[in-house]
Amino acid sequence: MEAGAALCPQCGALQPFDPSLSLFAILGLAEGFVIDPAALRSAALERLRAVHPDRFAQADGRTQRQSLEWTTRLNEAQAVLGDPLRRGDYLFSRHFGQSALGEEMGSLRDPEVLMRQMERREALEEAAAVRDQAALERLRAEAHAEEKQIEEQLAASFTAPEAGRIAPLLQEWQYLRKFLAEIDQYEERWDFA
Amino acid sequence: MAYSEKVIDHYENPRNVGGFGKEDAGVGTGMVGAPACGDVMRLQIKVNEQGIIEDAKFKTYGCGSAIASSSLVTEWVKGKTLDEAMTIKNSQIAEELELPPVKIHCSVLAEDAIKAAIEDYRKKSGASSSETH
């Protein structure tokens, strides 16, 4: 039987969820940073359909709970693997035993990464102070372009994973996400001002 | 989330915001960050010839607790020797600002920042100020 399959291929019965399955195995995908988004979507759809609680409405309580558990886990796997940053950090924790973004990593000291964040935030602050919408758009476009670059660097780095090379990429990406959220917040405030 | 009055006070009236020239004599710079929250903190000290921190400045992008923690530390270190400043613990910061458990890491960041600033100063001044006494 295929690892991670929710239904028994012989009798079609819903199998108990195996918590040792990786998020990739839950979706029946090969483990790796590079994923075809369409393949992820169709794998998730197909599996969600197979375990859908409606299909087990007449089943016993235990089976109903299993159906719900599979649904939850599949949704979670799709959400994590569907976001390249979360997927990267999940893979990082699979390789190195912890998230690259959590408190357990301690505070970040990399002066280059930190300097870039400081400069980015200063530029945003200046643009926001004079409500320069065009500058905000420019900063947003730059951040998106950097996200793309980091994604490419991660794809290359995960072929021979080294924590010291991958962690700073994930951390910088996380900073970019917060930065983009900050831009959105400024714009929302202006919309309602 | 409810901030304590002390956090709000430091957030609304941050002490010692700004910076010194990184290469200026007697200046030590500590930069630390917490990517999960998007925090980035720069804390600088200006040390006189007697080895006393005579001025301190900070610039922090982050939540209210991170700003308050760094603001408080710049107040605390003024007039202290480097060795005294090294003994500042995040628990003291958290206690003074009444930080809730989920914000303790902001005080850790501020402790790491002052330690990094002192290390930077000592490295730049050839470690002469501490190891030789």
Image (spheres, coloured by chain):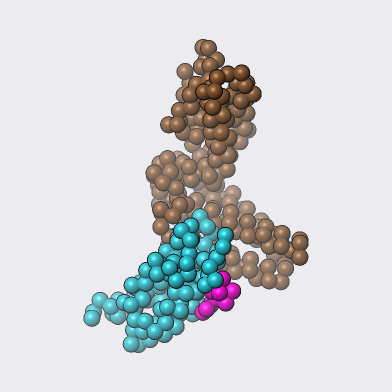
Chain colours: A brown, B cyan
Which quadrant does the C terminus of chain A fall into? Answer: bottom right
Between residues A139 and A76, which one lies in front from this camera angle?
Answer: A76
Which residue range is magenta in the image?
A: B8-17
Q: Quadrant of residue B83?
A: bottom left
Between residues A153 and B95, which one lies in front from this camera angle?
Answer: B95
A77 lies left or right of A181? left
A18 lies left or right of A117? left
A128 lies above or below B130: above
The residue lying at 59 percent from left, 69 percent from top is: A122
The residue lying at 33 percent from left, 87 percent from top is: B50
Residue at the right extreme of this rendering: A192
The residue lying at 35 percent from left, 87 percent from top is: B49
Between residues A57 and A160, which one lies in front from this camera angle?
Answer: A57
- Rendering coords of residue A79 (x, y %): 58, 39
Q: Was residue B12 drawn as part of the magenta stretch in this picture?
A: yes
Residue at the left extreme of this rendering: B133
